[in-house]
Image (cartoon, helix red, strand yellow):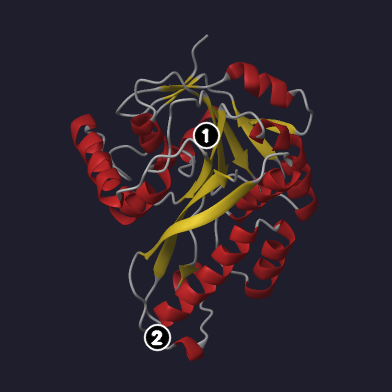
Amino acid sequence: MEKVRQASHAGSWYTDNPTKLSSDLEEWLRAAGLTKSPHVRGVIAPHAGYSYSGRAAAYAFGNIDPTNISRIFLLGPSHHYYTPRCALSTATVYKTPIGDLPVDVEMIKEIRAMGKFEMMDLRVDEAEHSMEMHLPYLAKVFQGHNVKVVPILVGSVSTESEAMYGELLAKYVDDPKNFFSVSSDFCHWGSRFNYMHYDKSHGPIHKSIEALDKMGMDIIETGDPDAFKKYLLEFDNTICGRHPISVFLHMLKHCSSKIKINFLRYEQSSQCQTKRDSSVSYASAAAKLES
């Protein structure tokens, strides 16, 4: 029986007008001017409203050559629902204003049989925006291709669980038909986020934020989940997709393929100058098979 996850954030976080949405995405992808590569096997991309991070996200999704891909694993953090585990979608289709993406129900069954995943309620699924914000881009890039999605909500998982989930999912990285879309924003800075780390040696606040984010991005590029964990413990940078990123790093560490993450774009929603300001950072990366 069909169970539909509605595009619950369309009309607020991004336009629900299919023509406008399609042309916005096309314009951003064109502006990024990237060459599509069949070696790109995954992306890390932001999940803010498109007026904030839509342009930056194009630098992730613009790398994708959809030709040989038939399955997309979505890894997104949980903003509203607490679970110490990873949760699988119970939906059979994910709607977007520009085309629907069927859920790979067979793959969900296979992963569920591992016994380490919970199932998420449709209400939880629709309340969460982290994976939904990737869907219009994926629907656009994979238009005309038969592709299914495997949505995995990554809860507040422990360091040990990140490693465990990464090991369990690593084998899927070695299948070239699989693609991975990892959802995360970077630093949330300001009193409203309870995070105001400021290293004055970098000059203005926004430069300190950039240095902090880029330190994290450089560590992610090394592919070392332990170094990333150490960085988070030391600076507590408010990277909301820290758990999905960590799980992905463990997947890359345990798979047989050699895949390297490269960041291609970094932006901030505004440039913080004073303690009264606030901003969110957006970073886009491609995970590419090294020959």
Between the C-alphas of marks 2 and 1, the distance is 39 Å
Q: Is residue 194 visible?
A: no
Q: Position of residue 221 (x, y in %)?
A: 59, 59
> Looking at the image, is 97 positioned above or below residue 28?
above
Q: Secondary structure at mark 1?
A: helix
Residue appearing at x 39%, y 72% in the figure: 278
Tell which of 43 and 234 is nearer to you: 43
Q: In which quadrant is the C terminus drawn?
A: top right
Residue at figure coordinates x 60%, y 35% from the top left: 152
Which of 263/190 is in front?
263
* Above/below status of 55 relative to 103: below
Look at mark 2 in the image and give the residue it sits on.
204
- Write down the residue under mark 1: 125
The mark nearer the N terminus, 2 or 1, is 1
Tell me which corner region of the image, top left, top right, bottom left or bottom right, holds residue 224.
bottom right
Residue 236 is situated, as x and y percent measured from the top left of the image, at 62, 70
Label placed on residue 27: none
Q: Nearer the viewer, residue 237 or 163?
A: 163
Q: Is residue 69 left or right of residue 49?
A: right
> In the image shown, does 188 or 62 lie closer to the viewer?
62
Q: Position of residue 267 (x, y in %)?
A: 38, 64
Q: Quadrant of residue 144?
A: top left
Above or below, 45 relative to 203:
above
- Farthest residue in the front direction? 291
Q: Residue at x 53, y 74 (%)?
A: 212
Judged left or right of residue 158, residue 82 is left
Q: In this image, 42 relative to 144: left or right?
A: right
Q: Is residue 158 visible?
A: yes
| Residue type beneath disc 1 | Asp
Secondary structure under badge 2? loop
Residue 133: percent from the left, percent from the top?
41, 42
Name the mark nearer the viewer: 2 or 1: 2
